[in-house]
Amino acid sequence: LAPPPRRAGLRPARGAGGAPPPHLRPARRRCGPLGRAGRTRLSVLGTDEEALKEAKADKYKQALMEEWSSAWEEEGEKEGFDWEMEKLRRKLEDVPEMYGGPKFWRRFIEVEPESVYAAYAESSYPGSKPGFQDSFRILFNNLLQFILGNDSEDGAEVASWDWQGALERAGPKTFFGSVAAGDLQTLVGGPLFLLLTKYHRELGPVFKLAFGPRSFIVVADPSIARYLLRDGSQNFDKGILAEILAPILGNGLIPADPDVWKARRRVISPAFHKQWLRSTLALFDDCTEDLLVDLRKRARSVDPTAPLPETVDAWKAWKYEDDAPARKAGAVDMEERFCSAALDIIGRAVFDYDFESASSESPLVRAVYRCLVEAEHRTTAFIPYWLIPGAQLLPSQQEFNNDLDLLNTKLEELVTKAFDDIASMGDEVYREAGQEVTDEDEVKHTSLLRFLVTVRGEEASATQLRDDLMTMLVAGHETTAALLTWTLYELFHPSGRSKHHLQRAREEADAVFAKRAAENRTGSVYEDVLDVPFIRLCLAEGLRLYPQPPLLIRRALDSDELPRPFPDSPKVTPARGSDIFMSTWSLHKDPKLWDDPESFDPSRWERKKEPGPDAPAGWRGFDPAKIPSQALYPTEQSADYAYLPFGAGNRRCVGDQFAILEATVMLTSIIHELDFEFALKNPESIQPKTGLGGLPVADVGMRTGATIHTEHGLWMRVFERSPSSSKES
Ligand code: HEM
């Protein structure tokens, strides 16, 4: 769990103690594009100008060229970035000094690595902002590839984006508008994760994507996932994601720099202890009941004669214009309902505050949503528009800042209240940082905030606590709501493709409620969650098909070679400062890893999956026997990193158990009591749709952000479960 040393240049690339691999040897960088001999000669150049002036210019050049070329031949490294620079420099030899000949270029290429490292080490987190040299190197490398068609320095094959096609499809106005607004989704013609999967199918598990001056190395392979997230994780941080989220999340766990992250993770992880998780079940029941009250009301008001839209497109009007006809028809946007319920849960569990979003729309709730929308927009924009001078004067940015102020004021108020409440409870509520919470310990705190306030030895400032809370709010709310939305969508799909799974899930739900009645209790207990293994597998399958988020983002702190998925895969070595996208969407749907990957089949997690002949080298398949007994879902280790529902390694999700418990309690109650139908005139007429690159997409459309949303809401008609459907199951 050690944070990456800041002196990036001193770090061995992989494993401890061993010599750095050749691509990390500082010596090579030191001699850089000029070669060792060239460098010696250059220092002569610098110290003995007079002598040089006297020397015949071309004779000197010739001698120098010979020395340089013998240096390259000796090293046998006529490839890669340095060699490209060398070739360019040789061409520039003929350009007169006054036009920026070798002297000009020397400024960029003859860099003392120590000075770069020193500048880098001083760079302030969050995010390992690449220095000027790094950015220049990456940009220059991109230019060499795109303009001259050279091989990429890092070895990743470049996916060529059809911008002419995009221009034609969108029209000049939308195209250039999207470029200006950094709207990637409109530019690529669909969610980014689909584009990445299209390239994954064409180019394999490692490739490079470039939009103008930015480039990303995209990976989707179990061994690379294991390396990025676990074995080599000390060399990668959250990079661009941290930079984007820092204004909202401050120094919360997601964007935190390694030092803060280590200290806060040590305090926050124990807050999710078993005793507290068990106590939150009552809260999940409460919020589920609020949701059910609303749904029952809708179910009773269904007007069977009310007209229903004939096409999915007609749903759009319900979402954005007028939902009165939807209400009349008893239709409800389940995506929005799950979002409200999850927000209420996180508010109460994390900081003892009831947003009451299920029943009202307070300015605070509106502020939360608008902040989330802005955060999502920033995540998918490729131009940091909010940093452009004057951008803060735009109405959208002003609104965002006002919302943030409103939220901050509320959070500060809650933090102060928690400090006061805890102070009045006496000394015995405090605990030492790192002190384990045992099963016998009484839960003395109702919320996560109160737990954090009671920790001694790692006391956090009010600002740090605000950042922690904001991070929980953002990370723990839409993710769970999206999981419930897509699982419900799959289980009640009008094609009936999941009918048999729904039936199995309902058998479990009915049995749990029967047991509850027999035991004369009304609320959920932990054992209820253990009694519904198939419902939990439905959720696990929901996370396989719709991973939240569909991309994990990292940045290389130093140049580092990635594991090769197949023996004949090219060597890929992202340069320091390279942004890397781990496409969990592509990984979870890779036909080389999963049987029938596009279909929703929760029972796949009950069977062993042996690696097929075309599976990546070294992948060990999935084995249900490897799921730890206390785990509530198939873990990343059980699938040998081909499945990453909650990430992996030291930055893995802290709220995984909380989320699965919450989603299980909700789904169990909902499918036990209610039936859902797509609110469409002929739901059976829905045909499987394809999107970018001919890949299947959900027929309710998909929008990407931090999580995957439907395009226009998940409008369902709700019915009380009929006796026949209860009997059926
Ligand atoms: C179904 C629901 C959820 C999913 C799918 C999910 C997924 C993830 C994933 C994939 C990561 C790793 C990100 C990365 O490596 O870049 C993560 C991190 C995180 N999650 Fe979750 N999450 C969920 C629910 C929650 C909840 C309920 C909370 C809190 C109450 C939470 C808090 C966090 C935090 C704080 C991190 C950052 C951890 C760190 O960097 O140390 N998540 N989550």
Image (spheres, grey):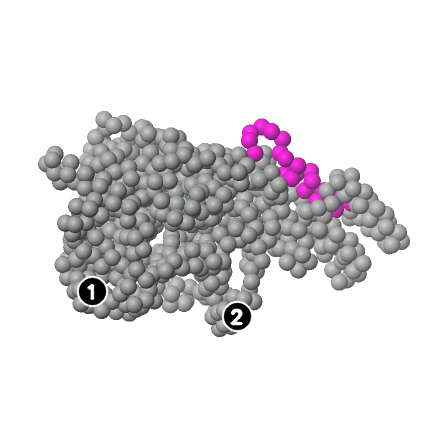
* Label 2 crowd (10 A; few <14 / some 14-19 / many >=20): few
Does any atom of ligand 1 lie closer than 8 Å to the CB of label 2? no
- Quarter of the image with the N terminus is top left
Residue 458 place in picture, x, y as percent: 35, 35
Residue 713 at least partly seen: yes
Which is nearer the eye, 129 or 219?
219
Question: Is residue 371 rendered magenta in the image?
Answer: no
- Quarter of the image with the C terminus is top left
CB within 8 Å, label 1 to label 2: no
Per the picture, the main secondary structure of the magenta-coloured stretch is helix
Whether residue 156 sits left or right of residue 263 in the image: it is right
Q: Quadrant of residue 493?
A: bottom left
Which residue does the numbered mark 1 point to in the structure image?
329
Q: What residue type is labelled 1?
A: Ala
Which is nearer the eye, 362 or 120?
362
Q: Furthest-left residue in view? A: 520
Residue 495 place in picture, x, y as percent: 32, 55
Whether residue 659 sits left or right of residue 150 in the image: it is left
Residue 417 at least partly seen: no
Helix, strand or loop under label 1? loop
Residue 597 place in picture, x, y as percent: 43, 46
